[in-house]
Structures are given as C-alpha cells and as structure tokens.
C-alpha cells in the first residue's frame, strides 16, 4: 500500500485551471443481449465442441467461419491531463455501461452501487435490482488504495468489455467510497493484475479470458496519450486504446521487447529496473528484489526508493527536495529539459521531458514526476506509472508471463496534445466471445498477501494549496 503522501495534485489542480464544462457523455446505456446459456458445464461443452470442429476444419484445410471475436479494443479516455485513464465495460442483464479506471496495478473489479451516497455524487452507479443476472455473494469487500478506499459486498454478474463477456464474474458493488476517489464519469475500477493480489480473491476478468480460449493471443496492450503539457487540454481527452487478445501494429513500430517477470508467483506485473540514465549519465541502481517495479497503468507518476530518487535529481543542476505538501518530491528549474531513461534488461526507453515536468509550482520552478515512495514488504520497490507508459506501447502477456514494450508509431504520437480528437463514448459492441469465470474463491477478503497499490488516487488528493500556489504565478 502506498503511504498517504502529503502531496496532492494535479488532477484537481488542472481541472480547476482548465475549468471548462465537460461535454455530457452517455452513461448508463442499456442494451439487450442475446440470450445465453448460463450454466458452466453447458458452456464449457459448447467451447469444447467448437474447438473440436475448428481444429478438425483447420487440419483438413477447410475454412471455419469465425463465430466469435477473439480480439477486442476498448478506446480509452484521458482524464484530467494524464491523471488517469479509463475505459468502459458493461454489467448485468440488460447490460448497463460504466466507465472504469484501467489499472494493471491491482486485481479487483468494483463499481459504485446505487446505495452509495457518500463519495458517489454525480457518479453513475450500478442498480442491482434492475439486473436479472445479479447474484449477491453477501460477502464483505473492501479495498484500500493510498488515499482512499472502497467497500461494499461481493456479487457475481455478467461483465462485458470490448466484445468479450464473462458470466459469473465476481466484483465488488461498493456503497462506501472515499470522497475524491472517483471523479465523474468514472464509476469504479477494473484491476488487470493477477488473481493472487485480488482482495476479493476472485479471478480477474482478464485472467478468465486469457486462461480460457477467448483471446487470439494471450496479451493485453496499452497505448496512452499525453496532454500534460497542453494548456488547452479539456477534462476529458482521447486516451488511446486498450486491446485484449492482440497487439495493434498501427500503434507501435519496431519489435516488442518482452521481458519475463522475475518472480515465481504472479502478483503485480513486475519487471526489474536494470539501468537508469539521467541527461545521459547512468545512476547506480539496486539489484535483486530491490530493483523490482510494478508496471502500473493506474498510477500517474513514478515512485521509487529515496536514495535512487535522490541520485536521479543529483544529475539535475539546481534541483532540490520539496517541502511541505511537496515532501517526497523534488523541484528543478523548468527550463531544464530532463530526459530520464529506464531499462528493464534490454532497450533503454526515454521518458519525454514533457512527462518528467509535472507542474510549475512557482515561476520557473517545476515539480518532477519521480517521487520518493516507501512500499510495504509485499509490494515492489518501484511503481512505474503513466509518466513512463505514455512513452511506449506496453504489452502485458499472460503466457509466458512477461511485459513487453515497443516504440510508439507516428500514428500514436500524433494523438498526443491533440485536443481536436473525439473522446470515446461508453459503448459496448455486441458480444461475440463469452467465457465463464472459474471457481472464484469469494471467501472474504482479508486482503490477501499483497495489498493493492493505490493507483489513480494519488493524484486526486494533491492539495488545495497547490491551487493557491498556481494562482500566484
Ligand atoms: C448484498 O448483500 C449484503 C449483505 O447481505 C448487503 O449488505 C448488500 O446491500 C447487498 N448488495 C446489493 C447490491 O444488493
Ligand atoms: C488499430 O488501431 C487503429 C488506430 O486506432 C485502428 O484504426 C485499427 O482499426 C486498429 N486495428 C484493429 C485490428 O483493431
Ligand atoms: C511544453 O510545451 C511548450 C509549448 O509547446 C514547449 O515549448 C515546451 O518545450 C514543452 N515543455 C516540455 C517540458 O516539453
Ligand atoms: C472458504 O474458506 C473456508 C475456511 O477457510 C474453506 O473451507 C472453504 O473451502 C473456502 N471457500 C472457497 C470457495 O474457497
Ligand atoms: C482475517 O485476518 C485475521 C487477522 O489476520 C484472521 O484472524 C482471520 O482468520 C482472517 N480471516 C479470513 C477469512 O481469512
């Protein structure tokens, strides 16, 4: 769990500065689904039968009509100038769509329920009484992030995303949500890390699909946009895309470099940081487990051990540790273009100076995106969030368990700072691939071995004092 840092941010800060009305977006769209058999055995039987036929057809050179989609794309929205990235999924029968943070740093799915009053103002909530597929597991659920938590009860429901459907997906329906944890239109969070860190102990949506036969290729991939240094950015901007079952070659160039996860148990998406350079100079980095980093789409910035963060800023003339609300952060002269590279055992990936520069906090003085983080024993030392992930195409591979990066294509790069692009709306295509969640252990959540890292919430708490500072500029 991340400590509750005295920081605060930028989501608030920027949304205030840009205070432009948010275009109303369609939420809570209902759609009718084609009737489906819900018992697992029958469905498994159908999958078996289909595979048999497809296998034989292929073996004998025939053409098997594609009966289900095995790849899917979910368009992402960039919220509050890179503070968080959300996609949409649909829950229930009839299905209702919700925007959820896409978080590779945790493993639970939860949404705010209609009984939520505190922390859910203006947030679309899930009404279980309107869904015929809702099953209340009547087991308490709670999850803690760095600066807030969500609690409620576990349920099982039909969940659809990007053309995939999982019946009996265990998810949290939360009626207690820390205020500020969710920012409208986001209703919850989809955890995309491994089951072992799920507070619900349930098999994550993605893992059911990856381990079953639903995806063409056992991967999910992200391309996310940058609007941090775009003064005309609106609260919501085009965020890129999240794909399941394939990588989209339009979005990257060159090869995808996969690095196997160094851990024997899959928990977070972990890679070792093997080298860091700042302005072309190498800094010394730890080896072994101290070098482990969670690759986390749900975290805005990059957090690491105090000594290594100090080493990074030591390469930047006139940088200084932040004080007060900025404790744990560093400041540096805004006119310095800082280039930090990270490598995980192969290519050295540069981070744009536009991502390193988090915010001007006084005239000419900027806050850097790398901050000091002290993680618990079960979490990796580093959290590599969107500050880095905006600079690469990132691929999360189920088997062999690994994370891959590739350079962004010109197409992807052209989306950065592009305020003219359409913001995706929350829609779900018709379902053409279905799976049933495996036996989920819904035994109550003594949050398991590892506590999920806070993710998006870090950003939501940066203080009102920042706003004061900014207005003094
Ligand atoms: C599910 O059951 C629990 C405990 O029985 C109850 O507190 C909760 O309100 C129910 N949730 C929904 C969404 O019906
Ligand atoms: C890949 O991405 C491009 C750009 O978003 C899109 O036009 C194309 O349809 C995508 N390809 C597939 C196979 O989804
Ligand atoms: C931010 O954008 C401005 C205007 O395009 C540009 O001059 C500046 O170099 C950018 N800052 C960084 C750190 O990239
Ligand atoms: C829940 O926990 C109990 C006691 O630890 C155990 O007997 C039971 O099998 C567990 N249920 C599931 C679904 O794992
Ligand atoms: C939850 O944790 C407490 C304290 O660690 C322990 O006593 C209890 O048995 C645990 N319950 C379950 C269901 O794991």
Image (cartoon, helix red, strand yellow):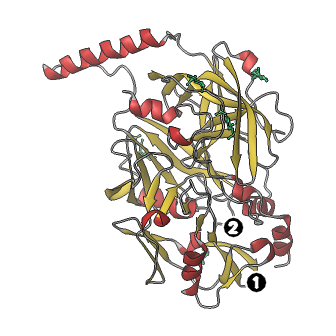
The answer to whether the residue bearing label 1 lies less than 8 angstroms from the nearest atom of ligand 3 is no
Residue that protrudes farthest toward the left in the picture: 60
Q: CA distance from mark 2 to mark 1?
A: 16 Å
Is disc 1 placed on a helix, strand or loop? loop
- Image quadrant for the N terminus? bottom right
User: Relative to residue 459, is residue 315 drawn left or right?
Assistant: left
Question: Where does the image place residue 260, in percent across and percent down from the top left?
Answer: 35, 53
Quadrant location of residue 470? bottom right
Tell me if mark 2 has few (under 14), some (14-19) or many (20+) residues whose alpha carbon lies within 10 angstroms of its own: few
The answer to whether the residue bearing label 2 lies less than 8 angstroms from the nearest atom of ligand 3 is yes
Labels 2, 1: front one = 1
Residue 363's disc number:
1
Please tell me which residue lies in front, 47 or 412: 47
Labels 2 and 1: the sequence-earlier one: 2
Residue name at image x 76 percent, y 29 percent? 113
Please tell me which residue lies in front, 245 or 1: 1
Residue 231's disc number:
2
């Amino acid at each position: 769990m991340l400590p509750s840092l005295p920081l605060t941010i930028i989501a608030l800060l920027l949304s205030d500065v840009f205070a432009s009305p948010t275009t109303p977006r369609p939420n809570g769209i209902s759609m009718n689904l084609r009737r489906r058999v819900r018992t697992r055995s029958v469905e498994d039987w159908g999958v078996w039968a289909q595979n048999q036929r497809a296998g034989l057809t292929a073996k004998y050179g025939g053409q098997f009509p594609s009966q289900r989609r095995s790849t899917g794309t979910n368009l992402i929205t960039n919220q509050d100038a890179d503070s968080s990235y959300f996609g949409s999924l649909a829950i229930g029968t009839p299905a209702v769509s919700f925007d959820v943070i896409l978080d590779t740093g945790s493993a639970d799915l939860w949404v705010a329920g209609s009984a939520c009053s505190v922390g859910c103002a203006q947030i679309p909530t899930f009404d279980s009484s309107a869904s015929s597929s809702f099953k209340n597991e009547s087991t308490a659920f709670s999850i803690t992030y760095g600066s807030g938590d969500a609690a409620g009860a576990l349920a099982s429901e039909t969940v659809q995303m990007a053309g995939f459907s999982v019946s009996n997906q265990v998810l949290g329906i939360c009626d207690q949500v820390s205020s500020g944890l969710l920012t409208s239109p986001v209703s919850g969070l989809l955890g995309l890390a491994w089951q072992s860190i799920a507070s619900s102990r349930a098999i994550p949506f993605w893992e059911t699909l990856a381990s079953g036969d639903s995806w063409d290729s056992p991967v999910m991939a992200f391309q996310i946009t940058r609007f941090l240094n775009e003064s005309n950015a609106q609260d919501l901007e085009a965020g890129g895309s999240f794909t399941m079952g394939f990588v989209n070659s339009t979005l990257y160039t060159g090869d995808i470099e996969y690095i196997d996860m160094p851990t024997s148990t899959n928990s977070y998406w972990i890679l070792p940081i093997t080298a860091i350079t700042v302005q072309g100079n190498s800094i010394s980095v730890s080896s072994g487990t101290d070098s482990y980093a969670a690759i986390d789409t749900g975290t805005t910035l990059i957090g690491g051990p105090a000594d290594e963060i100090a080493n990074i800023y030591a390469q930047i003339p006139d940088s200084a540790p932040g004080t007060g609300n900025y404790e744990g952060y560093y400041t540096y002269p805004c006119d310095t273009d800082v280039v930090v590279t990270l490598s995980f055992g192969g290519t050295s990936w540069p981070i744009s100076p536009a991502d390193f520069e988090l915010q001007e906090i006084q005239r000419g003085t900027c806050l850097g995106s790398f901050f000091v983080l002290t993680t618990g024993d079960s979490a990796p030392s580093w959290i590599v969030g969107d500050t880095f992930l905006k600079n690469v195409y990132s691929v999360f591979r189920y088997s062999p368990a690994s994370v891959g990066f590739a350079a962004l294509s010109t197409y992807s790069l052209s989306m950065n700072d592009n305020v003219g692009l359409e913001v995706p709306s929350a829609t779900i295509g018709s379902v053409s691939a279905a799976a049933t969640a495996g036996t989920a252990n819904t035994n109550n959540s003594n949050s398991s071995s590892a506590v999920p890292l806070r993710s998006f919430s870090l950003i939501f708490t940066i203080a009102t004092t920042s706003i004061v500072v900014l207005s003094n500029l």
